[in-house]
Amino acid sequence: MCEICGGTHVHFVQSGYVARWGPCPVCGPMPKEQWDREVEQLQQMIAALQQGDLAG
Ligand SMILES: [Zn+2]
């Protein structure tokens, strides 16, 4: 397992109050298929949160 990204291909850098992220310098950018899955999961999570807000 990569120590920098932990296998996620995303490299987070906390600098002061600002968090930046980018492709892991060791593993390289996330493969497109994996990226698409991540985006889909994120959209589903956002949709679920919005529905929860409306219901609550
Ligand atoms: Zn990595």
Image (cartoon, rainbow, N blue to C red):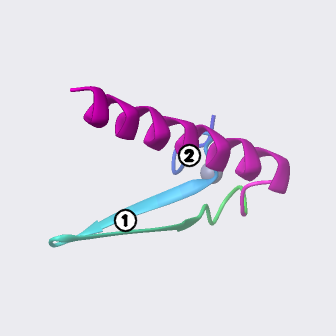
**Which of the two residues, 33 or 11, is positioned nearer the viewer here?**
33
Residue type beneath disc 2: Gln
Q: Is residue 40 above or below residue 15?
A: above
| Quadrant position of the C terminus in the picture | top left
Residue at point 63%, 34% (across, down): 1
Q: Earlier in the sequence, mark 2 or mark 1?
A: 1
- The residue at which mark 2 appears reads as 43
- Residue 41 magenta-drawn? yes
Identify which residue is drawn at 36% across, 36% down.
49
Residue at the extreme left of the image, as rendered: 17
Q: Main secondary structure of the magenta part?
A: helix
Where is residue 47 shown, x and y percent of the image?
48, 40
Depth check: give the residue in front, 41 or 2.
41
Which residue lies under the disc numbered 1? 13
Secondary element under disc 2, as helix, strand or loop, is helix
Residue extent of the magenta highlight: 29-56
Asked if one can make out residue 6 in the rendered structure from this viewpoint, the answer is no
Residue 16 picture quarter:
bottom left
* Circle 1: residue type: Val
Instruction: Residue at 75%, 50% (x, y): give it.
Output: 36
Q: Is mark 2 within 8 Å of ligand 1?
A: no
| Residue 6 as seen in the image, left or right of residue 20 | right
Q: Are marks 2 and 1 in contact (CB under 8 Å)?
A: no
- Return the x and y of residue 10 as percentages of the image width and height: 56, 55
Q: Nearer the viewer, residue 44 or 7?
A: 44
Residue 18 drawn at (x, y percent): 24, 73
